[in-house]
Amino acid sequence: MPDAGLATGDHFDVAVLGSGFSGSLISWLLQTAGLRTVVIDRARHPRFAIGESSTPAANLILRTLAAEYGLPELAALSRFGTWRETWPGMRCGLKRGFSYFAHRAGEHLNPDRENHNQLLVAASVSDQVGDTHWYRAEVDSFLARRAQEHGAVLLEETEIRSATRRAGCWSFELKRDGLARTIEADFVVDATGAGQALVNCGGVESDPVRLQTSTRSIFAHVRSLPLWSDVLATVDPSSTGQHPFRCDDSAMHHLLEEGWMWWLRFHNGLTSVGFVIDEARKPFDENLTARVEWDELLAKYPSIQNAFRDAELVHPELIRTGKLQRMNRAVAGADWALLPSTAGFVDPLHSTGIAHTLSGVERLTRILTQLPAGPDRNAGLSAYSENVSRELEWIDTLVHGCYECLADFRKFTAFSMCYFAAATTYERRRLDNPRAIEQAFLCADDEQMRQAVTTLSAVSGQMAASDFETLCEEALRPFNHVGLFSPRHRNMYECTALPESSTT
């Protein structure tokens, strides 16, 4: 992509570091609102990325942004039906909700009528208004091109050599195509995620915070993975009869002794798959290659291993990470800000990444476009920083409690309702007041909810499963708007979806 004749010394209102979905989207919004914006990325589109599972909260934010900035093409991405109608060439997958299947090492999964080892929680009432899995190589590229078409300058394959404050603005020394150049910007947004470009180039001090969750991952995209519903049908043809939606149209979680495995299906024949491994249960072994550890994990769980018998790894090959958790104490200053995905990351368990980052895009765009530089903007940025930090710690609480309950599916199911109570409450609060900039993601500012969940996490290991279920139900009662814990559902929830009339 050309850089529209960019010259050294060019001055911008905002420099955005990173052209993934969040960096490209905020650049598109800022440029649309009249701020001259440059996007800097060391790579080039299209490129592989994970963080692919959207949620109702993410879709509500997309629709709010589309209405606020007059971008109907963005609203089309907020529902599976309109995405496929408007952008049929941009691939995605249908996500009707969340599904969980609890495996035991050395045993085939055998569902029963009472659903003691499976849980499905709906997020939408139909395929048409369903959520989506984002095929990030195409989504990120689409948003980057939209930003550029609206006037943002996009610099790909560009290295940031240094970032310094000079004469009241930022000065970036860049290297591109072997040539050095310098540009200036009044404000900087870091959207580089784990790359944390502003920290690594010395523009912002690194000040890490320790989180409770401690996990790592091995992941890839595969081709020819059979439908899980077909795998279950080989055990019992009626095993999926109670499912409120097709389990393959979900963010699928296979719960294991070491952690869990995700399956996210796209409509291009590919499936995103990955193990998330709890370090307390299976520490990193540097003597194992990613492929050896992958094969060892598959071999422990016969139903999963059989499903992968003919599956083919595609580019890229298996990627193995170190510890996933990170969080920077400082999130924003008077002339800079980190988007939530750059400020920190907890774990993919509850698919919070896209929605949390979009909430940061929404709030930061409003601050930069509605508040002039000075005391009011500084106050807004300070509130933004405090909220993002609080939200990351809250997500950590919701995730860590689930790992603490992983060995007992009844307890895991009960504690996972903390997330669903937080998510559905947040969604309804957004519907009541979608433009309230002060709303914290997943109700992280609700002290009653936070205290209840923190207490539940602390006592989960000390109680019998039945008693813990009762305690969870009582503690979450003020936030249970959708019939969580109802015995009649027997772990098959369709009532948690937002009503279709609320998604217009």
Image (tube, rainbow, N blue to C red):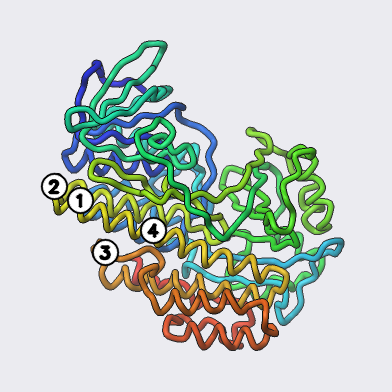
Instruction: In the rendered structure, find residue 438 and report the number of the disc placed on it.
Output: 3
Q: Nearer the viewer, mark 2 or mark 4?
A: 2
Q: Label 1: which residue? A: 378
Q: Is residue 37 above or below residue 252?
A: above
Q: Which residue is more in the foreground, 296 or 195? A: 195
Q: CA distance from mark 4 to mark 3?
A: 19 Å
The disc, 1 or 4, on the residue closer to the chain's N-terminal end is: 4
Q: Nearer the viewer, mark 1 or mark 4?
A: 1
Badge 4 local density, few (<14 within 10 Å), some, or many (20+)? Answer: many
Q: CA distance from mark 1 to mark 3?
A: 15 Å
User: How many circles with numbers are drawn on the protein?
Assistant: 4
Q: Which residue is more in the foreground, 456 or 491? A: 456
The disc, 3 or 2, on the residue closer to the chain's N-terminal end is: 2
Q: Is residue 194 above or below residue 124?
A: above
Q: Label 2: which residue? A: 374
Q: Amino acid at mark 3?
A: Glu
Q: Secondary structure at mark 1?
A: helix
Q: Amino acid at mark 4?
A: Asn
Q: Position of residue 486 (x, y in %)?
A: 56, 86
Mark 1–mark 3 CB contact (< 8 Å) = no
